Image: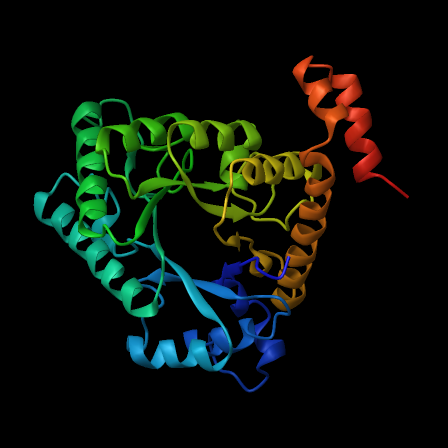
């Protein structure tokens, strides 16, 4: 398991700032959060939000990340500026849409300087809220053509679409695995693929392992956001805390399909005041244990036979013997 890459959400390390930095006035800086993240045992990488986390020059940030023994896995685009409120890649104003595309290219440039291997596009602002608000075909074409342009700009990197059913928009232009696969097919770029966020998949009323299998069948699973939730919103709970069996099946499916990327934790310890270091270490320990269970299930003849017959009783008994062994 030593070759595994574990990455995490940097903003988590603002949680309980007043306890970790008693002298701190206000929010911790990005460099401070990097230092705190480095205290997590087993953590190997960070993902950086662009441009949100670019509070210092790239050289200073890169040196800090290297000094604390971490590396950058990928960049995650954030179109947080007010002008993108009603769309980034699908903004009705051509100038603002162009600004969003060019900002994404600058994010890719920054990623190259950090040695990142992937740019993740979570297009939360791209969607609609009302009937008779959007020209759906034009919005779709604007979204796909922008993704295509960004992917063509970065043939040396992977570009990945992360979907979510809604929030902040009432309906997202890319709400589920199916629409993302269609977008990837229409864009037609070899370096383009999909990131699955476990809580987003649940939120989309999808089965995580099934979504992973379909992505592997028609595209590439480039990124993975591990977390958990109750399926009603983007809860960002600890890995396996609500749906351990579905998480195990999800990890097994990805293992079978040859996933080699980082195990990235998109969890929200700051939402309930958890210690982010302990929370991240628990996530890492959970994934390592689940991957060890995957080894017992991956080439299990009895399980494969039960699945071939769609014998749910037999398969549950076999999985129980592995998951619930005393």
* Residue 37 drawn at (x, y percent): 54, 71
Q: Which of 35 and 233 is in front in this view?
A: 35
Q: Indicate the quadrant where residue 125 lies.
A: top left
Indicate the quadrant containing the N terminus: top left, top right, bottom left or bottom right: bottom right
Could you tell me which residue is drawn at 73 percent across and 31 percent down?
300
From the viewer's perspective, is residue 53 above or below residue 155? below
Q: Which of 241 and 181 is in front in this view?
A: 181
From the viewer's perspective, is residue 199 above or below residue 42? above
Could you tell me which residue is drawn at 71 percent across and 47 percent down?
292
Could you tell me which residue is drawn at 79 percent across and 39 percent down?
323
Colour setting? rainbow
Q: Nearer the viewer, residue 23 or 308?
A: 308
Q: In this view, does 102 lie to the left or right of 283?
A: left
From the viewer's perspective, is residue 241 above or below residue 216? below
Could you tell me which residue is drawn at 18 percent across and 30 percent down?
141
How many numbered markers are drawn? 0
Q: In this view, does 93 lie to the left or right of 9?
A: left
* Residue 183 drawn at (x, y percent): 28, 31
Q: Indicate the quadrant where residue 321 lies.
A: top right
* Residue 47 drawn at (x, y percent): 43, 61
Outermost right residue: 326
* Residue 113 drawn at (x, y percent): 28, 69
Is residue 29 at least partly visible in the picture? no
Is residue 187 at least partly visible in the picture? yes
Indicate the quadrant containing the C terminus: top left, top right, bottom left or bottom right: top right
Outermost left residue: 95
């Amino acid at each position: 398991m030593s070759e595994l890459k574990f990455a995490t959400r940097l903003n988590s390390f603002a949680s309980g700032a007043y306890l970790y930095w008693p002298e701190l006035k206000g929010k911790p800086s990005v460099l401070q959060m990097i230092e705190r993240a480095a205290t997590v045992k087993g953590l190997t990488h960070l993902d950086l939000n662009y441009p949100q986390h670019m509070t210092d020059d790239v050289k200073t940030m890169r040196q800090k990340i290297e000094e604390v023994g971490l590396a950058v896995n990928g960049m995650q685009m954030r179109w947080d500026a007010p002008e993108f409120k009603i769309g980034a890649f699908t903004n009705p104003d051509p100038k603002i849409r162009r600004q969003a595309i060019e900002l994404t290219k600058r994010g890719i440039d920054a990623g190259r300087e950090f040695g990142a291997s992937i740019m993740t596009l979570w297009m939360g602002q791209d969607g609609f809220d009302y009937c008779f608000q959007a020209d759906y075909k034009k919005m779709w074409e604007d979204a796909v053509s922008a993704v295509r342009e960004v992917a063509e700009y970065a043939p040396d990197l992977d570009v990945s679409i992360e979907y979510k059913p809604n929030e902040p928009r009432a309906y997202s232009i890319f709400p589920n695995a199916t629409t993302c696969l269609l977008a990837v097919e229409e864009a037609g770029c070899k370096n383009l693929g999909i990131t699955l966020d476990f809580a987003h998949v649940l939120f989309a009323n999808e089965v995580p392992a099934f979504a992973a299998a379909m992505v592997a069948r028609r595209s590439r699973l480039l990124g993975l956001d591990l977390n958990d939730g109750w399926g009603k919103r983007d809860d960002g709970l600890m890995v396996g805390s609500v749906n351990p069996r579905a998480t195990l099946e999800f990890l097994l499916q990805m293992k079978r399909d040859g996933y080699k990327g980082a195990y990235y934790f998109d969890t929200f310890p700051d939402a309930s005041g958890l210690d982010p270091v302990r929370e991240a270490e628990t996530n890492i320990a959970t994934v390592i244990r689940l991957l060890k269970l995957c080894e017992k299930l991956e080439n299990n003849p009895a399980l494969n036979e039960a699945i071939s017959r769609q014998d749910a009783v037999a398969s549950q008994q076999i999985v129980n013997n592995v998951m619930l062994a005393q």
